[in-house]
Amino acid sequence: MLNIVLFGPPGAGKGTQSAKLIEKYGLIHLSTGDIFRANIKGGTELGNLAKSFIDKGQLVPDEVTIGMLAGEVNKNPGAKGFIFDGFPRTQAQAKALDELLASKSTAISMMLALEVEEEELRKRLLLRGKDSGRADDQNPEVIQNRINVYNGETMPVKDFYTAQGKYKGINGIGEIESIFTNLCQAIEA
Ligand code: ADP
């Protein structure tokens, strides 16, 4: 299996590049942010819980997120592989993902990290907020909180995969097509 963790701060372009990667490699796309938003839209219990955290730019608790993600992996038994987008965001999530995949006799192949500096992220997120309808992209304080949570809680996930020799950093600034080409090269290297 080809199991990729697509990593990077909010606004790095994970969703855009995931869409291209799943098409090219025939992978299942699991975006925890998308799944939470679908649940919020559907008014589910999980959605209501997630909304209270997402609206403030905080992480949804690990227990909830890990349980949800495991359920989604289990729904796709014959998958050629997965792109995990927005997950893992904490070291506890990374550990849980390793255990889940090991129980299925597979593993993460690599972490591809889109690297973009903060000033550019703030610009992109505010721009996206204008037409995405995402409330968490429209409030500068919520955006800053998400960036801070990323720097504090999510950055250590990079060390987790670096220690396994699986980290590959990719410049996330430039044309969408050239970033995609660089991601494909990293996958096939
Ligand atoms: P972003 O553009 O900020 O990367 P996402 O769509 O990936 O946005 O996630 C939106 C929000 O959903 C996050 O700010 C967070 O509150 C919640 N969320 C998404 N993935 C996770 C996760 N793995 N763990 C905890 N919370 C998450």
Image (tube, rainbow, N blue to C red):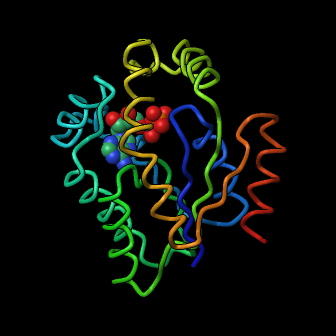
Task: Find residue 129 and report its horizontal and vertical position in percent.
Answer: 51, 17
Looking at the figure, which quarter contains the N terminus? bottom right
Outermost residue, bottom direction?
105
Please state the total of marks drawn on the protein image. Answer: 0
Identify which residue is drawn at 44% across, 21% down.
143
Task: Find residue 42 and report its horizontal and vertical position in percent.
Answer: 27, 36
- Above or below, comparing residue 60 to residue 26 in the picture: above
Of the pair 98 and 1, the residue shown nearer to us:
98
Observer able to see residue 141: yes
Ligand 1 falls in which quarter? top left
Q: In the drawing, does residue 38 fall left or right of residue 165?
A: left
Task: Find residue 170 and report its horizontal and vertical position in percent.
Answer: 71, 50
Identify which residue is drawn at 78% across, 45% down.
179
Identify which residue is drawn at 29% across, 64% down.
71
Q: In the drawing, does residue 45 fall left or right of residue 119?
A: left
- Above or below, comparing residue 126 to residue 165 in the picture: above
Of the pair 51 and 150, the residue shown nearer to us:
150
Observer able to see residue 37: no
Q: In the drawing, does residue 128 fall left or right of residue 49?
A: right
- Above or below, comparing residue 1 to residue 27 in the picture: below
Task: Find residue 21 and report its horizontal and vertical position in percent.
Answer: 68, 56
Q: In the drawing, does residue 63 fall left or right of residue 176?
A: left
Looking at the figure, which quarter contains the C terminus? bottom right
Identify which residue is drawn at 53% across, 59% down.
5
